[in-house]
Image (cartoon, rainbow, N blue to C red):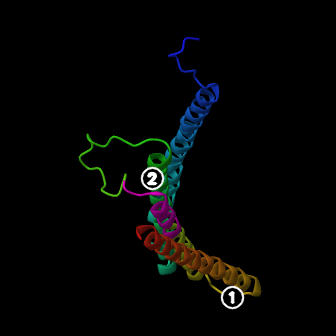
Amino acid sequence: MAENETPTAPPATMERLFENAIFASRWLLAPFYLGLALSIVVVLIKFIAEFFHLAIHAFTATESDVILGILALVDLTLMGSLLIIVIFSGYENFVSKIDHAGHKDWPEWMGTIDFSALKLKLLSSIVAISAVHLLKSFMALKTITPEMERSLFWLVVIHLVFVVSSVLLALSDRISGKHSEK
């Protein structure tokens, strides 16, 4: 080797290749997000079925049955919205940025949700879905049996766990955000 040549370090080259492979592996998540996007079709099919069931029985159903049907539609809508949040935010946070320059109706929140905000939105959606499910369970009550009472107790406990978890996560994010600003 000539005196003015510097030797290339094989470990650095190996390290670079290893890091590039790890970085490229993020694309393995893309099929997951595509699968979630396709699962919205399943939620839509269920929504349409629930809607037609509600519409067919609208004149003969009781007020409680109509409210339960509408709550089922709200529940499915929240699930679809949750999927959209997960798909867009997850893809942009973990795989690649989406070029939205050509989309005139691009929602402002898309592309601005970081991982911390994504967790909060997910938990908020889960709390809303849990609340709708809990309300549906209360509305469906005709008589209270010990089994129903136990079931409702656990639904309330689970809902409260979701609520407390989301409040604690929001507080921890707020506290950690204040520390990172200093």
Q: Does 70 lie within the magenta span?
A: no
Residue 116 lies, with reference to residue 87, above or below; the image says below
Q: Residue furthest right?
A: 146
Q: From the image, state whether disc 1 or disc 2 is nearer to you.
A: 2
Q: Residue furthest left?
A: 104
Q: Which residue is tagged 2?
A: 89
At 45% from the left and 63% from the top, the residue drawn is 117
At 54% from the left and 21% from the top, the residue drawn is 6
Q: Residue 164: image x %, image y %?
A: 58, 79
Mark 2, other Cα within 10 Å: few <14 / some 14–19 / many ≥20: many
Q: Secondary structure at mark 2?
A: helix
Q: Residue 48: image x %, image y %?
A: 47, 55
Q: Nearer the viewer, residue 107 or 139?
A: 107
Amino acid residing under circle 2: Ser
Q: Secondary structure at mark 1?
A: loop
Direction from residue 131 to residue 102 in the image, left or right: left
Q: Which residue is tagged 1?
A: 144
Amino acid residing under circle 1: Ile
- The magenta stretch spans which residues? 112-124
